[in-house]
Image: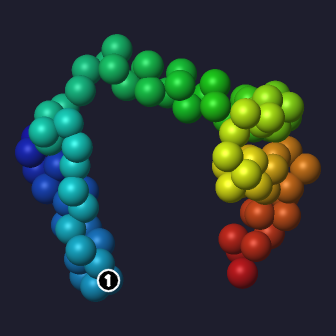
Amino acid sequence: AGSAIREWFRTYKIPDGKPPNVFGLDEKFMDKHYALEIIKECNHAWKELITGEKERNLDNMDPEVQGLVRKLSKSNLVDLAAEDDD
């Protein structure tokens, strides 16, 4: 079943003219522990963005990164969602 699921995710965009998806990690299925760690990492990054914590710690970052983080700050998330609906 795992191979069939992987193959579906690899090819489902092809009818729309897009290339096949490529998988990292040598195309291995990862365990629950690995998945939960990725979820925790993403959740932590999300919390830093929406609380403004990330924006407050930008002094040592590249100006391009500073601009991107400010664009994604809490005050702009609603505006970005509206742009995405267009």
Apparent side of residue 9 relative to residue 85 in the rendered image (left or right): left
**Residue 54: horizontal and vertical position, in percent?**
76, 33
- How many numbered callouts? 1
Residue of label 1 = 16
Residue 52 visible from this viewpoint: yes
Mark 1, Cα crowd under 10 Å, few <14 / some 14-19 / many 20+, is few
Determine the residue positioned at 20% across, 36% down: 25
| Quadrant of res 78 | bottom right
**Residue 19: horizontal and vertical position, in percent?**
24, 74
Determine the residue positioned at 11% across, 50% down: 4
Quadrant for the C terminus, please. bottom right
Residue sitting nearer the eye, 15 or 37: 37
**Residue 28: horizontal and vertical position, in percent?**
14, 34
Residue sticking out furthest to the bottom: 17
Answer above or below: position of 54 versus 7.
Answer: above
Answer above or below: position of 79 versus 26.
Answer: below
**Residue 48: horizontal and vertical position, in percent?**
74, 30
Residue 2 visible from this viewpoint: no
The coloring applied to the image is rainbow
Mark 1, secondary structure of its residue: helix
Answer above or below: position of 16 versus 4.
Answer: below
**Tag 1: amino acid:** Asp
Residue sitting nearer the eye, 61 or 67: 61
Determine the residue positioned at 71% across, 74% down: 85
Quadrant for the N terminus, please. top left
Residue sticking out furthest to the top: 33
Answer above or below: position of 9 versus 27.
Answer: below
